[in-house]
Image (cartoon, helix red, strand yellow):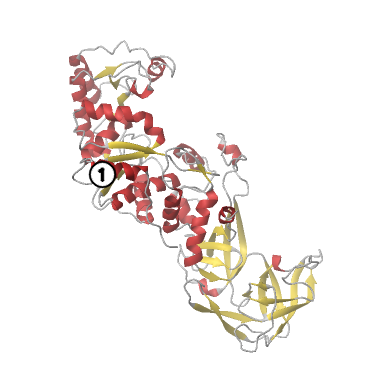
Amino acid sequence: MAEKEMASNFIQNAIEEDLKNGKYTDGIHTRFPPEPNGYLHIGHAKSICLNFGLAERNHGLCNLRFDDTNPTKEDTEYVDSIQEDIKWLGFSWGNRKFYASDYFDKLYDYAVQLIKKGLAYVDDLSAEEIKAYRGTLTEPGKESPYRNRSIEENLDLFARMKAGEFADGEKVLRAKIDMASPNMVMRDTVIYRIAHATHHRTGDKWCIYPMYDFAHPLSDAIEGITHSVCTLEFEEHRPFYDWLLDSLDFNPNTRPRQIEFARLNLTNTVTSKRKLRQLVEEGYVRGWDDPRMPTISGLRRRGYTPASIRNFCEEIGVAKANSLVDVAMLEHSVREDLNENADRVMAVLDPVKVVITNYPEDKQEWLLADNNPMHGGQRFVPFSREIWIDRADFMENPPKKYFRLKPGGEVRLKHAYIIKCEEVVKDADGNVTELHCTCDPTSKTGDATANRKIKGTIHWVACKTALPAEVRLYDYLLETDADGNVPDDFQHALNPDSMKVIENAWIEPSVKLAAAGTHYQFLRTGYFVVDPDTTPDHLVFNRVVGLRDSWAKSQKK
């Protein structure tokens, strides 16, 4: 699947307008700023593609910056996974990897500057009291009794906060703005809090940490970011972003401009980092990389490809209003990519044995089979007297227009012969255990004399050489309402059939040495990928997507 060129969008238009007006003469500079408190998900993939894509399109730069301002929830595990995900998606930050913690000294100095300007104060109110004083959307807030402390007292208290004299929650530093502002963020937002916690990079050097709303715009400005692209929930934070940079005298022609876009919401999917963490920590899934998870690592293990995710992000575009995207559209992108690039093989997931009675017991043939009709290539598959077929490809009492195997009926074996069912063998309970068939030795696929036409063609594998495999079939982890939304109490929406494990599947021997991450189309079944659990003695496959493309079909109506 050829990747599409990046379409124009309102953010790109804003960049072009800024350049036209003579701003940012040193070039465009974006950033991707994850908090290292969890694994990235499909929503982050959209932000990655957008930020790196804008930089590339405008011949600029894109930084990777970890906004690591909350040591109680952050871990190097998340730092490592985030870097792996970005590289896997095909993007590079070069030598521009930064951390907000790189700037802790500078951020502290900026806070001191605000205090000296009378624009910040130390508050003794508790978190609950601050919330109560803040007011509501229809009622103004109430000023803290500590709001009018002198500059000297605030400087002294803030220094003592830094020195560790106070307990967690005992004091905070707040911006001094407007408690009557209609924007709740502007009602003296907290910019520093006390946290006696070890930071994954700075250790125990600090016991006060900047809040995200304070550290983020200043980190952008320090790095020379021109366009701070973020999701819509940060729109109400933009006035504080601008107030802070104004208050600290950053040049309007070079400082960052915040622009918001709609986050990615998918049907049957949660993209709340808190909820994803809950799924992992409470054991609803096997880990962050569980193939049912919408994390990038989960999608990677499921078998989604980087190109398909990039194409999907480009296809959905960049909007100003939130909307819900059908997850089938993402599956369509994956299916398109794999249709072009995945080799075809034969695998039987629900086997029933077929004995071809007129085929010699000691004979084995190697038949030529196509790998992929899109890019060619061929392989040999072994054929012998006993084969496995899928149980669904035989019916003892079929309806009309049933073109697979039935008593007395004929069907073509893909790449092989036409066979006819002569006898059905059952066990004491009436279950079909074996089918005895004969083959037409003149009907081999590819032979010049094989000109008989048969409507039905089924896949198979030879019993003697087939490899046993474990196959994991995945469905949506979460069930939704009629509009595709996941309820807030998502634990009650878990799909009990989200994973089915088949332990007695059989697959042709050409896949024996396939490495983890290798994709195949199992003929007539779907797209599959070799799972990392695979060993030389135990093949494990994950179903990526089925063959049926509901989204593409809906677009044709």
How many numbered circles are shown?
1
Seen in the picture, residue 205 relative to 153 is either above or below; the reply is below
The answer to whether any part of residue 347 appears in the image is: yes
Would you say 13 lies left or right of 326 here?
A: left
Would you say 2 lies left or right of 198 here?
A: right
- Residue sitting nearer the eye, 187 or 192: 187
Q: Residue at x 63, y 87 (%)?
A: 363
The quadrant of the rendering that contains the N terminus is bottom left
Q: Residue at x 21, y 20 (%)?
A: 115
The quadrant in which residue 184 appears is top left
Task: Label 1: state its secondary structure.
Answer: strand
Would you say 79 lies left or right of 396 here?
A: left
- Residue sitting nearer the eye, 298 or 76: 298
Instruction: From the image, tell me which residue sits under label 1.
Output: 98
Seen in the picture, residue 428 relative to 215 is either above or below; the reply is below
Residue type, mark 1 in image: Phe
Position of residue 107 measured from the top left corner of the image (x, y, whole percent): 22, 31
The quadrant in which residue 139 appears is top left
Position of residue 421 measured from the top left corner of the image (x, y, whole percent): 76, 77
Q: Residue at x 42, y 51 (%)?
A: 314
The answer to whether any part of residue 195 appears in the image is: no
Seen in the picture, residue 277 relative to 415 is either above or below; the reply is above
The quadrant in which residue 552 appears is bottom right
Q: Residue at x 24, y 43 (%)?
A: 20
Seen in the picture, residue 411 relative to 448 is either above or below; the reply is above
Crowding around mark 1 (Cα neighbors within 10 Å: few <14, some 14 to 19, many 20+) is: some
Would you say 276 lies left or right of 362 here?
A: left
Position of residue 442 measured from the top left corner of the image (x, y, whole percent): 68, 88
